[in-house]
């Protein structure tokens, strides 16, 4: 039933499935919650004050600092 799309992905299998697929569990959990119950996804975001962040997303600030040589700029400024 899961294969045909007639069954929702079991949330309690996110961790083991993400590990087996070699993907970030936070990424998979976000996708599963978006598909099953978007309102439920809002709960950790509201409580923690931020969306679920993947390991790769967490590394982005360090990458930006390295690539810009520490020069600060506004990436959302209107031109």
Image (cartoon, grey):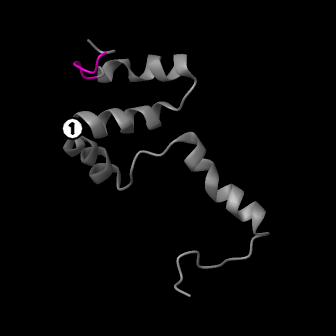
34 is higher (above) or lower (below) than 18:
below
Q: Quadrant of residue 37?
A: top left
Q: Is residue 32 left or right of residue 66?
A: left
The answer to if 6 sits in the magenta stretch is: yes
Q: Main secondary structure of the magenta part?
A: loop
Residue situated furthest front in the rendering: 4
Q: Residue at x 52, y 85 (%)?
A: 78
Q: Is residue 56 left or right of residue 39?
A: right
Q: Secondary structure at mark 1?
A: loop
Residue situated furthest top in the rendering: 1
The quarter of the rendered structure image containing the C terminus is bottom right
Residue, disc 1: 37
- Measuring from the top left, give residue 55's x and y in whole percent: 57, 41
Residue segment shown in magenta? 4-8
The quarter of the rendered structure image containing the N terminus is top left
- Measuring from the top left, give residue 59's x and y in whole percent: 63, 49
Q: Quadrant of residue 13?
A: top left
79 is higher (above) or lower (below) than 59:
below
Total residue callouts: 1
The answer to if 71 sits in the magenta stretch is: no
- Measuring from the top left, give residue 44's x and y in whole percent: 30, 45
């Amino acid at each position: 039933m899961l294969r045909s799309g007639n069954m929702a992905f079991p949330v309690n299998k996110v961790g083991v499935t993400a590990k087996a697929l070699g993907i970030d569990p936070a990424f998979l959990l976000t996708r599963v919650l978006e598909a099953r119950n978007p309102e439920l996804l809002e709960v950790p975001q509201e409580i923690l004050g931020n969306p679920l962040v993947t390991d790769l997303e967490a590394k982005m600030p360090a990458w930006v600092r390295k690539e810009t040589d520490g020069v600060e700029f506004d990436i959302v400024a209107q031109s």
